[in-house]
Amino acid sequence: MKEIKTIEFKDDILYLIDQRKLPITYEIFQCETYKEVDFAIKDMVVRGAPAIGATAAYGVVLAAKEFLNNSKDEFFKNMEEALDLLNKSRPTAVNLMWAIRRMRNLIEENKELSVNDIYEKIRIEADNIFNEDIQTNKQMGKHGNEVIPEKATILTHCNTGALATAGFGTALGVVREAFYTGKDIFVYADETRPRLQGGRLTAWELRQEEIPSKLIADNVAATLIRDGKIDVILVGADRIALNGDTANKIGTFMLSVVAKAYNVPFYIVAPTTTIDFDIETGEEIEIEERGSEEVTHIENVRIAPEGMDVFNPAFDVTPSENITGIITEKGIVRPPYRENILKLK
Ligand code: MRU
């Protein structure tokens, strides 16, 4: 399996594969300050819920490094500002808020230590978040592989691979596991307008490992499902409510409706860090709206008329009744979701 270093932290510099540039060029984006990390998340240099969480954790390390010579009072005040800024860099993926909360709690619990010692703890915790995510993804791969037939055609949406996580991937991690355990699989990857995470990133990962696959325009999926060409649909998640409602990349909801109409199993693959135990239903999930240029332009070339208004939500919510199961590192959660999700807490 080819190693993809989506996020790498070395000598107090954060190196990110610049996902805005793939697959045309492979470039590394360097962050030396937490404000650069905030920019990288906002501008989608790095994207995908678990990847954003791990990146933000390293943003906290860079903030602590920057404030190392502060008095203790100043350090805590400046760190609080940095935590707040990073927490707001994108609104929907809860892994981001989860990682920031974990860092904030760590600082809180170690207030009596020296600033240097707190910095050390923060650095170790960021590495823990990063390493745990890879392990978690591998576990999900194993559980998810149980629902993949020996010969299967799988449909995916957005990018849920190594690029969306610290490594291996969520839904694409299940694809990897099925492929490397010798299953005869074929993948259809939705291109995923408007940012084309499927066409640019999933396709890149599938080509890297030569996993048999085809790229499709989003509008093709319903025809493939109706024609009995898809055995299982695997998608990731940005936030899961207690009742199982799931926010994921825009277009996921539409896929789930077609899947339900034609009885095709529809699985969410997500770590338990994507569950928001504080919200009851998907109605409470804030859906990010992004700039109109994502729709009016492709690679800086205008494709819509000047002055045209745009509605560009980055995510939608799939109601839990459309979801066959939620594949987590702790196993596959099935209905009744509220009861079974609470067991994961
Ligand atoms: O806007 P993005 O590219 O950050 O959205 C990513 C997705 O919606 C993924 O499907 C989700 O984060 C799960 S990926 C492990």
Image: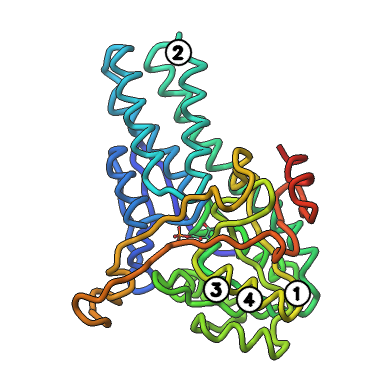
Q: Which residue is mark 2?
A: 111
Disc 3: which residue = 206
The CA span between labels 4 and 2 is 48 Å
Secondary structure under tag 1 reads loop
**Residue placed at 33% from the left, 41% from the top?**
13
Query: Which quadrant of the figure has residue 343?
Result: top right
Q: Quadrant of the N terminus?
A: bottom right
Does residue 15 lie above or below 180 as drawn? above
Q: Alpha-carbon distance for marks 1 and 2? A: 51 Å
- Determine whether label 4 and label 2 are within 8 Å by CB: no
**Amino acid residing under circle 4:** Leu
Q: Which of 152/254 is in front?
A: 254
Between tags 1 and 2, which lies in front? 2
**Residue 37, x across and y down, in percent:** 33, 44
Tag 3 secondary structure? helix
Circle 4 — which element?
strand
Q: CA distance from mark 2 to mark 3?
A: 46 Å
